[in-house]
């Protein structure tokens, strides 16, 4: 649903597609595949040993989590506005929807009208 590749970490918001979806298996496979490809090019490790996950339950604000993810580069001092960061976005939301979400980030985080 949303992603942000930061210099030292990654944020992903993913959605299960069935009751049998397995977050741990997904994370393990994603880490294994990306680490293998990265190691072949960079000759160094890509991931730390552990990771943090949080499962959203019914009633939790998914869009608030998307906004949090998109605002990471601003909080990290990398850009002034979320839309300026080239390594974040969504495969679910189109450009217009992301612009609305980014505007929501600016308004909530920085008091922009």
Image: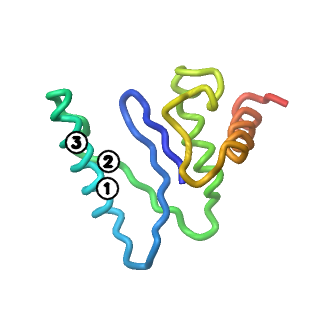
Residue drawn at x 49%, y 53% as measured from the top left: 13
Element type at mark 1? helix
Instruction: Return the disc, 3 or 2, that comes first in the chain's sequence.
Output: 3
| Structural distance between the alpha carbons of marks 1 and 2 | 9 Å
Quarter of image, res 57: bottom right
Residue drawn at x 74%, y 37% as measured from the top left: 103
Q: Residue furthest bottom?
A: 19
Which percent across, then down, holds residue 56? Answer: 52, 62
Q: Which numbered disc, 1 or 3, marks the residue closer to the eye?
A: 3
Residue drawn at x 36%, y 30% as measured from the top left: 8
Taking the image as shown, residue 91 lies to the left or right of residue 22, namely right
Q: Are marks 1 and 3 in contact (CB under 8 Å)?
A: no
Instruction: Return the disc, 1 or 2, that comes first in the chain's sequence.
Output: 1
Q: Which numbered disc, 3 or 2, marks the residue closer to the eye?
A: 3
Which percent across, then down, holds residue 17? Answer: 46, 71
Residue highlighted by disc 2: 51
| Quarter of the picture holding the N terminus | bottom right
Element type at mark 3? helix
Q: Residue 35 shows which numbered tag?
A: 3
Residues packed near mark 2 inside 10 Å, few (<14), some (14 to 19) or many (20 plus): few
Quarter of image, res 22: bottom left
Residue highlighted by disc 1: 27
């Amino acid at each position: 649903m949303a992603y942000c590749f930061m210099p030292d970490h990654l944020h992903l918001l993913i959605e299960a597609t069935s009751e049998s979806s397995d977050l741990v298996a997904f994370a393990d496979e994603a880490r294994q595949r990306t680490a293998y490809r990265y190691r072949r090019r960079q000759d160094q490790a890509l991931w730390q040993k552990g990771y943090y996950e949080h499962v959203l339950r019914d009633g939790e604000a998914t869009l608030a989590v998307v906004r949090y993810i998109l605002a990471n580069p601003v909080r990290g001092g990398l850009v002034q506005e979320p839309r300026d960061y080239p390594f974040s976005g969504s495969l679910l939301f189109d450009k217009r929807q992301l612009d609305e979400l980014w505007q929501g980030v600016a308004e909530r985080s920085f008091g922009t009208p």
